[in-house]
Amino acid sequence: MTKYLNIHPNLIKERKGATFDPYTLTCLLWDGDEVVKHKRNLVALLENDPNLQDENLSDFLSQEEKIDFAIKKTIYLFRKLGMNEKEYYMFLFQNFYPFQQLGFPLHFVMFTSTLKLLCSPEQANYWLPKASNLEILGCYAQTELGHGTFLKGLETTAVYDPLNEEFVLNTPTTTSMKWWSGQLGKVANYCIVIAQLYIMNKCYGIHPFILQIRSLEDHSFMPGVITGDVGPKMALNSIDNGFMKLDNVRIPRNQLLMKYDQVLKDGTYISGPNKKFMYATMMTVRCTIIMESAQNLAAACTIAVRYSVVRQQSEAEQGAGEQSVLNFQTQQYRLFSALSTTFALFFAWRSMNEACQQILTDASQGKTDQFLFLHSFLAGLKAQSTWLATKYIQTCRECCGGHGVSLASGLPLLESHTAVSCTYEGDNTVMILQTGKFLLKCSRDISQGKNLVGFVSYLNANYTTEHQDVDSNLHLPALLKLCQHRSKRLSVKFTPWKNSLKLLVK
Amino acid sequence: MTKYLNIHPNLIKERKGATFDPYTLTCLLWDGDEVVKHKRNLVALLENDPNLQDENLSDFLSQEEKIDFAIKKTIYLFRKLGMNEKEYYMFLFQNFYPFQQLGFPLHFVMFTSTLKLLCSPEQANYWLPKASNLEILGCYAQTELGHGTFLKGLETTAVYDPLNEEFVLNTPTTTSMKWWSGQLGKVANYCIVIAQLYIMNKCYGIHPFILQIRSLEDHSFMPGVITGDVGPKMALNSIDNGFMKLDNVRIPRNQLLMKYDQVLKDGTYISGPNKKFMYATMMTVRCTIIMESAQNLAAACTIAVRYSVVRQQSEAEQGAGEQSVLNFQTQQYRLFSALSTTFALFFAWRSMNEACQQILTDASQGKTDQFLFLHSFLAGLKAQSTWLATKYIQTCRECCGGHGVSLASGLPLLESHTAVSCTYEGDNTVMILQTGKFLLKCSRDISQGKNLVGFVSYLNANYTTEHQDVDSNLHLPALLKLCQHRSKRLSVKFTPWKNSLKLLVK
């Protein structure tokens, strides 16, 4: 990394003034020295391997060039360097994203993970090796032009034809076209399609199907399938978010993913147990978004704080010479608020991620009592983390003045990338209302004499104001108690509003 | 406009329910029926003249194509349609901007207006016709790579050479390169350069010079001049914001703009009176930004409210069918807050614009007592309007869910365009501190027994809380009084902080 050796003297001076060891903090954040070293090896790999270098700065590439290069790099990482999926994730999300475009992330995040979750054992044996070897490239098509949040409203149909033992898939209206799915536009040759299942004119609700959309030989469309790119967006332009029309596309019966619900040859529908677990992918994705928010805000803070050390502007006293803008109180107030939020989000993710792993493991073994809690808190934290990160990345960008406006600063990309995460994977307004709804349910349970268990058991207690002065509250247990007190008070206060809230959430 | 005739039935229904006449409101906003009709004629012109049609949607054009087409259109409007400058402004700012790229706006907004303000009568006779006829295309180069807010810190030098009666211009360091100037990168052949004036080794501070940067024959650089584009930005990518290096560029003595300060042949420096008026361009530009904020937010509200009527999502009761998302309280709360802010900003601009015209007219006749007020309030309102508009355009975009993320919605362009206006023409944080500083000065004046006149005379009064209940305060005079009361109370409260604030503003 010799290319970075030319460090501005102001930065060296400020770094010497640190009252803690930055590497110790890094290890605390990332769970130990070993993980950090592994991460840094991966960074060195990307920076030093000529096959992984962009020929041009990506801000100057077209969408096609970005996608093309991203795919080449990803194939190289898997095939030539033998990287496995977990390493790739770490590489993708924890180091370079969104600055380095990497190929078909949705293949891993949505397609493969959904297959793992929803395939019957035979289906898993057949599909998973193909997906893991990148023999097939998949995406996940759920949202439609006219339908997002309200899943029951999806219009795509899968009608069972018992004579041929096939499902016939259609997008019968303009609004039913699949829309937004990442990699559906150009890259994927397979996709998981969410469609309303019909058997003998009866609708059984939405179900997941696996569908080949393009030839593995020449990438031409399969009969009855048309897809395309949805056009330029405010972010994620290296991903080919796409639309798809289906016109009487036939797939064999065993391409309904049948871990939970099954359709037998004769059209008999068997509803499986424990279906809540179907939402596990959604939850892990939301948990990842919390980490991404923290990461993106961390990157923005790093850029803006370093810039504020190097940038000299204005004199404290006439003739005293210009000074680092970080010396100004307004700059400190704005940047340090952003910085402290980064740490808050990061540790919130750490703790939520641990809970998520535990609860999903329990749920896979049938113990689902904390599932509603997990869903509700992930929803709220997804919303809060993306909103906070967006707000403070914007602050960081504004703190860099004109240079923050240049794409070269990296800040506009971080900002737009984080801003759109307020919308995807669950609209933030809908998300926080789900958390609110859950808290009101908790509050009602308590008022009916129930004792809450698990993560919300703090709501059982009655809180009183212990300390009236600021200083006595400035330690972690007191601050935690204040937050719990506030949560309790608000959930009790808003309980009479439950009906109104229910209407909003619907 | 037959192409828009296919209106969604939900929109027709909602419009029929209006309790006021929209055209009356439009006329109220834009100062009468005549202005509105003129505006609409201009709109029809752009929509119906084939020479003014984009061949491709501009979201798909490269920067070069955008600039190229914008210039063609502007030349057409001036040369073929005989549009004058005022009509062009209305066309540019009040109807299509930022959706329609139009050519060299900075030529009018910064170059010509600065010439009008700072040329001596002889200079005006020479330069203004060339600028107005578009014989020369100009820009305004003030900000440098290393210097923005703190004008005294600018490093570009103009050294007077009495022997040849010329100024020698240099950008002696990397940080002194001119940076960000709109149209400096590729389009302009002239520019106004702000540089430190040196005569016989003595520095007289920053002064404005007019400089030819490119040949009028073949657009090649003039000797010693190098310019280029600063690269992709988060907004304004149809404008070639540029950098410029100057290496011993010589210009005749009479290319110092000499309405106020003059340098005689022998190098004698004559400092002119009434120099505050030099800042009039800056003020009118900030006033225009307030209008642009209101306009952009209005456009965003229109898009988001219409979308929310057409978009159907979720059922109020199971089986009731999906409903317009505008029916949801959360959607209403967010959109109507944005909508009311639009009107607040619009009328704030109307009133500020009137004050601005009056005070600048007075100032041009030597009456400058309200100048500091104007500067201070324009600064604060520029900051508040751009921040509020950015925040609520973001809200509008989020209210459109995934479709708001698509550039096709128009919302990302409005958002990024408004977001960067928080930075250009005066960083918002610096701006609000200038308003604060002025209010504290007013407060100190009052405490010293002075009686304030003009727009801040409301601070002379002592306010008491007249109405304790909400209803009695819900009429305009009471609300105005509450705002005045609050302003008075805060300025008194923060007066002891003056020194700290002064440090911040510096």
Image: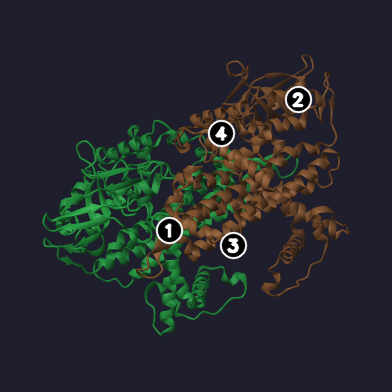
Chain colours: A brown, B green
Of label 3 and label 4, which has the lower sequence position?
3
| In the image: residue B291, left or right of residue A357 | left
Amino acid type at circle 2 is Leu
Residue that label 1 marks: B427
Return the residue found at the far bottom.
B449
Residue that label 3 marks: A19
B473 relative to A135, above or below: below
Of label 2 and label 4, which has the lower sequence position?
4
Distance from disc 2 to disc 4, alpha carbons, whole Å, reads 27 Å
Q: Nearer the viewer, mark 3 or mark 2?
A: 3
| Element carrying mark 2 | loop
Return the residue found at the far right.
A449
| Element carrying mark 1 | loop
Which numbered dot is residue A256? Answer: 2
| Element carrying mark 3 | loop
Instruction: Report the chain holding disc 2.
Output: A
> In which quadrant of the rendered image does the C terminus of chain B lie?
bottom left
Image x and y of residue B466, in percent: 56, 78
Q: Nearer the viewer, mark 2 or mark 4?
A: 4
The reply to whether the C-beta atoms of the residues labelled 4 and 1 are less than 8 Å apart is: no
Amino acid type at circle 3 is Thr
Distance from disc 4 to disc 1, alpha carbons, whole Å, reads 34 Å
Category of crowding for the residue at label 1, using alpha-carbon neighbours closer than 10 angstroms: few (below 14), some (14–19), many (at least 20): many
Q: Nearer the viewer, mark 3 or mark 1?
A: 3
Which numbered dot is residue A239? Answer: 4
Distance from disc 3 to disc 4, alpha carbons, whole Å, reads 42 Å
> In which quadrant of the rendered image does the N terminus of chain B lie?
top left
Image x and y of residue A71, in percent: 56, 28
Amino acid type at circle 4 is Ile
Instruction: Report the chain holding disc 4.
Output: A
The reply to whether the C-beta atoms of the residues labelled 3 and 1 are less than 8 Å apart is: no
| Relative depth, front residue between A144 and A382 | A382
